[in-house]
Image (spheres, rainbow, N blue to C red):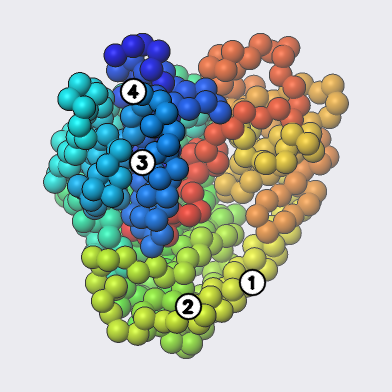
């Protein structure tokens, strides 16, 4: 294989997929591929797929269809499909799209370079799906998308049996990493310049169940607090069933664990939660929210909600609205129920008409937008420290602003005065909030304090940026969130627990 062959990884879905794509990129670069320049057509295009939403199949096959004439015109070009949809559809993918060269599953992403080479030599599609994990993915090479923030997997798989979710059958049973391995990875990342990590698992706070320690996750949070140079720790996503008070105490008492919690509600109706097989009820969820707020009044709590689950009545939906109104979520990822073949919910009676689901969805969105705007408005006039981010604001360039994430993970666009020292992604700035919108804050009063960090140094070294060449408002682009962020299209159902 020529050293000049290029690759592109296209990622769909949740945080697990985003992190898996970093590993796929690392594997390909380790095998001699180079990342394709933006706007060019790669020699190898890899689709890392999601199977959660109803249109996932159509989206994949539509994209594959668009690539067929491109591949026909480029001898030697290869297309690979991996991820949850590949695990589910298997040989169906090459039957429907015979121009695909490689299909691999969630348990054998490390096989991709070998499968590509085998397909190239044998001139036929390679379909390889393993039924169980071959090796913990964190042992694989990784091309981190950010110099200053990183995902760190604590577990893979899920032991829950939610009736709407197909992921456990595709990702497998939960497997936990040893604490020492996790902390070693975190320390290595910090040594490379990272100042923020997000601990990642499909049910992150069930961590430790495999080796019999119910307080393993809170111990892990406290251990992260002892790592010198690690300034911010986040985690996603916990399950309300497994959310214990020792985790709340660890969050409140560990300075570098951020006052932010993403905890999926899914429904405010205990009757619907039972039908979803969520194993907690409305009262337990609300109790966790209250205890988090008592321990950390400044905490921003976000959630996932599914509207229109089979059998949901107007009374059930009103209970969801009531929980949203009481909980005062900073934001919510809201989804219309999507029937997935192979899940128990797909066969349930009481599937709701599209127009009923749409009307309820719009009411929920309106309520949450109002709450988000009100909660953000309370912050106008306050001061906060931001981790300067890369590529968060789509209009930052034209408005001469940079963007960053506050400790509570709110997105803040901030102005840099003409001639002022330029913050780099990974640096820390103090700003005063001057304006609030439902989904972001603005700080137009200038930077009140700039702290240059090793993370900023690492970003500059990675991007070849000389100190004097940085320009205000120039952003380069990466996945959102200080640490790679939850993708709104996928948080509800895939890795939410």
Q: Nearer the viewer, mark 3 or mark 1?
A: 3
Q: Name the residue under label 1.
A: 366
Q: Where is residue 218 in the image (x, y as percent from the top left)?
A: 34, 47
Task: Give the spatial CA distance, label 1 vs label 4.
Answer: 50 Å
- The mark that comes first in sequence, 1 or 4, is 4
Please report the residue visible at 20 percent of the width from the left and 21 percent of the height from the top.
121
Residue where numbered disc 2 is placed: 354
| Residue at 42% from the left image edge and 36% from the top image edge | 69
Instruction: Of the two numbered discs 2 and 3 on the same chain, state the one appearing first in sequence.
Output: 3
Please state the total of marks drawn on the protein image: 4
Residue under label 4: 76
For residue 46, above or below residue 440: above
Q: Mark 3 points at which residue?
A: 48
Residue at point 41%, 59% (across, down): 55
The image shows residue 192 at horizontal and vertical percentages of 45, 19
Q: How crowded is mark 1: few (under 14 residues within 10 Å), some or many (20 or more)?
A: few
Which secondary structure lies at badge 3?
Answer: strand
Which quadrant of the figure contains the N terminus? top left
């Amino acid at each position: 294989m020529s050293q000049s062959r290029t690759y592109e990884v296209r990622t769909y879905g949740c945080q697990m997929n985003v992190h898996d794509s970093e590993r796929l990129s690392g594997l390909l670069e380790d095998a001699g591929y180079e990342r394709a320049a933006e706007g060019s057509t790669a020699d190898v295009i890899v689709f890392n797929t999601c199977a959660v939403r109803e249109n996932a199949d159509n989206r994949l096959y539509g994209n594959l269809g668009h690539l067929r004439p491109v591949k026909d015109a480029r001898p030697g070009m290869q297309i690979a499909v991996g991820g949850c949809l590949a695990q589910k559809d298997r040989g169906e993918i090459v039957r429907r799209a015979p121009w695909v060269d490689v299909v691999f599953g969630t348990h054998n992403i490390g096989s991709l370079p070998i499968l590509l080479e085998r397909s190239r030599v044998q001139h036929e599609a390679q379909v390889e799906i393993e039924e169980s994990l071959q090796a913990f993915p964190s042992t694989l090479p990784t091309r981190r998308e950010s110099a200053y923030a990183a995902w760190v997997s604590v577990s893979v798989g899920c032991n829950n049996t939610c009736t709407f979710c197909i992921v456990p059958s595709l990702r497998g049973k939960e497997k936990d990493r040893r604490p020492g391995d996790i902390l070693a990875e975190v320390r290595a990342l910090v040594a490379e310049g990272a100042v923020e990590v997000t601990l990642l698992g499909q049910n992150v706070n069930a961590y430790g169940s495999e080796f019999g320690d119910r307080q393993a996750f809170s111990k892990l949070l406290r251990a992260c607090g002892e790592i010198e140079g690690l300034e911010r720790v986040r985690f996603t996503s916990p399950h309300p069933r497994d959310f214990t008070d020792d985790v709340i105490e660890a969050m409140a008492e560990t300075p570098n664990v951020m006052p932010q919690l993403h905890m999926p509600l899914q429904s405010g109706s205990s009757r619907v939660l039972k039908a979803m097989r969520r194993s907690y009820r409305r009262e337990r969820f609300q109790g966790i929210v209250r205890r988090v707020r008592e321990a950390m009044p400044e905490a921003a709590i976000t959630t996932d909600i599914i509207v229109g689950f089979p059998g949901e009545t107007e009374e059930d939906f009103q209970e969801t609205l009531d929980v949203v109104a009481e909980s005062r979520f900073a934001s919510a990822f809201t989804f219309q129920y999507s029937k997935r073949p192979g899940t128990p919910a797909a066969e349930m009676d009481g599937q709701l008409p599209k127009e009923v689901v749409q009307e309820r969805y719009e009411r929920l969105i309106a309520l949450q937008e109002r709450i988000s705007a009100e909660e953000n408005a309370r912050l106008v006039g306050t001061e906060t420290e931001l981790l300067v981010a890369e590529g968060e604001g789509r209009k930052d360039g034209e408005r001469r602003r940079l963007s960053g994430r506050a400790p509570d993970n709110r997105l803040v666009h901030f102005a840099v005065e003409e001639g002022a020292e330029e913050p780099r992604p990974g640096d820390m700035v103090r700003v005063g909030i001057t304006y609030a919108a439902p989904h972001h804050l603005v700080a137009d009063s200038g930077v009140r304090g700039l702290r240059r960090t090793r993370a900023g140094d690492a970003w500059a070294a990675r991007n070849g940026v000389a100190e004097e060449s940085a320009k205000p408002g120039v952003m380069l682009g990466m996945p959102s969130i200080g640490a790679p962020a939850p993708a709104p299209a996928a948080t509800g159902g895939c890795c939410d627990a």
